[in-house]
Amino acid sequence: MTYRCALITGASSGIGEAFARALPKSTSLLLTGRDRAKLAHLASELANAERTVRSVAADLATVEGRQAVIGFAEGQPVDLLVNNAGVGHLGRVVDNPPERESEMALLNMVAPVELTRALLPDILKRSGKGRRGGLIFVASAAAFMPIPLFATYAASKAFLLHYAEALAEELSDSPVDVLALCPGATKTRFFERASMTRFDSLHQMHDADRVAREGLQALGHRVVHVVGPTNYLATAAARFLPRRFVAAAAERAMRRWQ
């Protein structure tokens, strides 16, 4: 991994923070998230003589937040973009607050598209002559199936998966690698924020460090990486079973978390 500078969204905790810690000490970091204090603390901790670490607090579900991050990256030698920020909310679409439904669509889909389009031209310019650029989209094992009670989240991650796969093909002749990283349940604050009150019953949750490490290892070697053999088997089965059956089974599973 010879990246000069990485921009990581959702870096104040969870998988985003794990990416910041997993990258080499020679890679400069641009960290963004909603928690200004945590970002500042992480930036101070990770800065060293070899690299600079800068942070900006922004809400990527807003136009102002997305423009702030794009402006933050201008003039910086970003050659790795980690689109990690995301949010979910458990419940029927008709029962969920309208603002939460919109937030999921804006943060999980619109923000990665706008940031990628804004940064990609310069990433391409900086790549080549033995150096490669990278784009990582943190999707989810949920991207492979319709999930009632988690409909918008799963659909948004399916969008991200398909977007990354298509983008990888468009860039197949360029020195820029694209990865759709698809973790399953991971030990982060995601479940608490998604109003999933019984997530502590999950016994096979992965560490965020493992997810980030596998993502960096997979980048440049494959386009889609599902974390964990159990998740891989589940996503493979979802591709071949009848969609109505998959949706019904997913709904039964989700009801256990209400």
Image: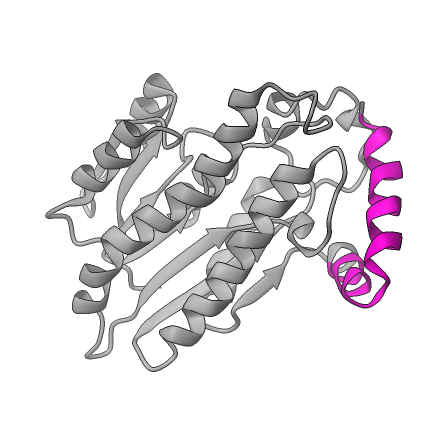
Q: Residue 26 appears at what percent x and percent y?
A: 26, 53
Q: Residue furthest front?
A: 94
Q: Is residue 196 left or right of residue 258?
A: left
Q: Is residue 169 left or right of residue 14?
A: left
Q: Is residue 250 left or right of residue 63?
A: right
Q: State which quadrant residue 255 falls in.
A: top right
Residue 195 or residue 209, whichever sits in front: 195
Q: Residue 7 appears at what percent x and percent y?
A: 30, 46
At horizontal 59% and vertical 62% (from top left) the residue drawn is 225
At horizontal 75% and vertical 33% (from top left) the residue drawn is 149
Task: Please state the total of marks drawn on the protein image.
Answer: 0
Q: State which quadrant residue 107 falls in.
A: top left
Magenta span contains residue 59:
no
Residue 214 or residue 78, whichever sits in front: 78
Q: Residue 48 appears at what percent x and percent y?
A: 23, 39
Residue 20 or residue 222, whichever sits in front: 222
The region drawn magenta spans 232-257
Q: State which quadrant residue 46 falls in.
A: top left
For the N terminus, give its image quadrant. bottom left
Q: Is any atom of residue 157 visible in this view?
A: yes
Residue 44 or residue 165, whichever sits in front: 165
Q: Residue 42 appears at what percent x and percent y?
A: 35, 29
Q: Main secondary structure of the magenta part?
A: helix
At horizontal 72% and vertical 26% (from top left) the residue drawn is 91
For the C terminus, give its image quadrant. top right
